[in-house]
Image (cartoon, rainbow, N blue to C red):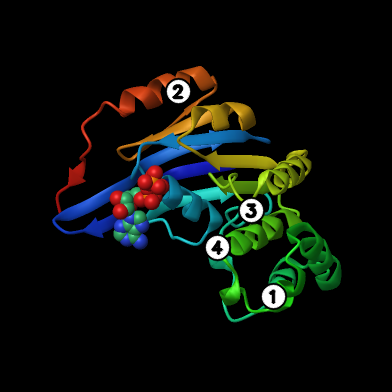
Amino acid sequence: MMRFERVTKTFRRRGGHQVILDDVSIDLPGRMRLGILGRNGAGKSTLLKLLAGSEPVDAGRIVMEGAVSFPVGFTGTFHPMLTARQNLHFLCTVYGMDHAETAGWVEEFTELGPYFDMPVATYSSGMFARMAMASSFAFDFDIYLVDEAFEVGDTAFRAKCAAAFDARLHDASLILVSQNMDTIRRHCDCAAVMHQGRLDVFDRLDDAFDYYEATLLAPAEQRAPE
Ligand SMILES: Nc1ncnc2c1ncn2[C@@H]1O[C@H](COP(=O)(O)OP(=O)(O)OP(=O)(O)O)[C@@H](O)[C@H]1O
């Protein structure tokens, strides 16, 4: 379940405000597979941060039922000077999971070998991405937030991520940000389009895609005076 009650979010910028959500109210009951579309800068990543609780709304209220994930594959969750195992220890404490069992699962999944016990600051970007993806699947959330994070690692690792993702989504909700309509079609059964402070939800994917394509032709700027 996800409900927006008159939610407004803006960012200050030179000469005015960037409007992300302008007095938006929506109500999506039950389990959902929701795709979020929007042109560059529409506010999709900001929306995920609002849902994750890492960014505050200016006004209104977002109500989510169940445990909400950090964005899947998000590397900002990890402290660079701690090892993968130490980072997971911290996350397990936050989410109330068994440390040893979770670290064991992620260690096997990532195939990082000795790097698993080295500071994550020493990882290549690919290793860091593997660690972030595996950690996202290690926790049992009710709602998974995903920001176009599927293209990580080699073919074998991607297949492993897809299987873990499917298993996790079996009885969880998904909110997936993507500008790729094929990705949304593969994973979602409804979609919302962000455009100029609005968040319009469509039950039929094709209706969302038509509207999204129309927004791509709209003028780029919407600037509210200060
Ligand atoms: N912390 C911030 N302070 C000020 N402006 C911000 C901040 N975060 C995002 N913005 C601005 O808000 C707008 C929306 O950014 P956001 O990253 O949410 O868009 P997006 O739809 O995810 O874009 P893209 O598709 O390009 O990744 C952009 O104009 C961005 O510059």
Q: Mark 4 or mark 3: name the one nearer the start of the chain.
A: 3
Q: Mark 3 or mark 1: name the one nearer the start of the chain.
A: 3
Mark 4–mark 3 Cα distance, whole angstroms, equals: 25 Å
Is 178 positioned to the left or the right of 117 in the image?
left
Mark 3–mark 1 Cα distance, whole angstroms, equals: 17 Å
Mark 2–mark 4 Cα distance, whole angstroms, equals: 33 Å
Count residues near mark 2 (Cα–Cα under 10 Å), then give few for <14, some for 14-19, many for 20+: many
In the image, what residue type sits under mark 1? Phe
Nearer mark to the viewer, of 1 and 4: 4
Residue beneath disc 1: 90
Mark 1–mark 2 Cα distance, whole angstroms, equals: 40 Å
In the image, what residue type sits under mark 4? Ser
Nearer mark to the viewer, of 3 and 1: 1
Residue beneath disc 3: 68
Nearer mark to the viewer, of 2 and 4: 4
* Label 4 within 8 A of ligand 1 by Cβ: no
Query: How far across and how far down the image is residue 167, in percent?
Result: 79, 42
Nearer mark to the viewer, of 4 and 3: 4
Residue beneath disc 2: 209
Disc 4 to disc 3: CB gap under 8 Å: no
Count of marks overlaid on the render: 4
Residue lying at 21% horizontally and 32% vertically, measured from the top left: 219
Secondary structure category for the residue under label 4: helix
In the image, what residue type sits under mark 2? Phe
Mark 1–mark 4 Cα distance, whole angstroms, equals: 21 Å
In the image, what residue type sits under mark 3? Val
- Quarter of the picture containing the C terminus is bottom left
Residue beneath disc 4: 125
Q: Mark 1 or mark 2: name the one nearer the start of the chain.
A: 1
